[in-house]
């Protein structure tokens, strides 16, 4: 009987076999490098694989994931990914994609102590506090959580626009930032229509003279 982790190795062999069957040059093409047009900043939730839900192939999307798709100005990991994506890979679109039913968002709505994770959830709590009047006017808890998921995505798009990395590339060439939300109930991605392509959406205090 296979151990649980061994099932992954067996699955990999079958996947590789299937890919070669469909396209004998599949892996040869991957070795030539990547040229993605998109950077995907998504949630770590195992139910939201970027390539699968967008029906794209390996090499088409550069991906960064963390709990609740947060963009924090002190997160060196995320900023390094962002810098590499726009500076080296020359991506044209940065997508922040949250999802309804997000465990991080639901946890942030509680007063429960989540240990070390409290430090991360604090970012979502700040979003809640910023929009507390709107959110607490929604009496249905699920609808309130769904709205916080949306507001969190919008806030992270705005946080991206505040970075020097993004603003520098707005001076050089086209770069668009998008906010999306994925739904488990129907498998569809919803465009929140928060699309930034220049500095006009950034408050003056956050603009850099580049």
Image (tube, grey):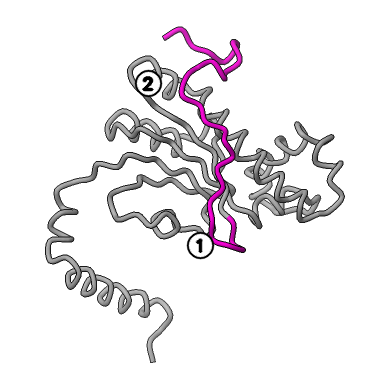
Q: Which mark is residue 156?
A: none
Crowding around mark 1 (Cα neighbors within 10 Å: few <14, some 14 to 19, many 20+) is: few
Q: Position of residue 53 (x, y in %)?
A: 45, 58
Mark 2 and mark 1: Cα distance apart in space: 32 Å
**Residue that numbered label 2 is attached to:** 169
In the image, residue 181 above or below residue 101: above
The secondary structure type at the circle numbered 2 is: helix
Chain part drawn in magenta: 183-210
User: Can you give x and y, in whole percent of width and height, for residue 100 in the image?
Assistant: 64, 54
Magenta span: helix, strand or loop, mainly? loop
Mark earlier in primary sequence (2, 1): 1
Using residue 13 as the reference point, say whether residue 62 is left or right of it: right
Name the residue at the top extreme: 209
**The image quarter in which residue 172 lies:** top left
Which residue is painted at 28% across and 50% down in the image?
Answer: 59
Residue designated by label 1: 46
Q: Is residue 35 above or below residue 169?
A: below
Q: Nearer the viewer, residue 111 or 46?
A: 46
Instruction: Judge whether residue 194 is colored magenta.
Output: yes
């Amino acid at each position: 009987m296979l151990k649980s982790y061994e099932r992954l190795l067996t699955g990999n062999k079958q996947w590789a076999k299937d890919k070669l069957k469909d396209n004998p040059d599949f892996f040869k093409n991957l070795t030539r490098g990547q040229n993605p047009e998109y950077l995907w900043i998504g949630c770590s939730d195992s139910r939201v694989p970027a390539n699968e839900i967008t029906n794209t192939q390996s090499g088409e999307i550069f991906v960064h994931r963390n709990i609740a798709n947060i963009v924090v100005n002190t997160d060196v990991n995320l900023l390094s990914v962002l810098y590499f994506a726009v500076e080296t890979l020359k991506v044209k679109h940065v997508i922040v994609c949250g999802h309804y039913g997000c465990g991080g968002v639901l946890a942030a709505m509680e007063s429960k102590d989540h240990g070390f994770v409290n430090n991360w959830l604090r970012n979502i709590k700040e979003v809640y506090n910023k929009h507390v009047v709107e959110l607490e006017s929604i009496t249905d808890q699920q609808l309130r959580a769904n709205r916080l998921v949306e507001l969190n995505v919008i806030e992270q798009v705005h946080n991206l626009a505040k970075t020097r990395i993004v603003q520098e590339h707005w001076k050089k060439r086209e770069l668009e930032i998008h906010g999306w939300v994925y739904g488990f109930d129907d498998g569809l991605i919803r465009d929140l229509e928060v699309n930034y392509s220049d500095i006009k959406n950034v408050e003056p205090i956050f603009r850099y003279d580049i």
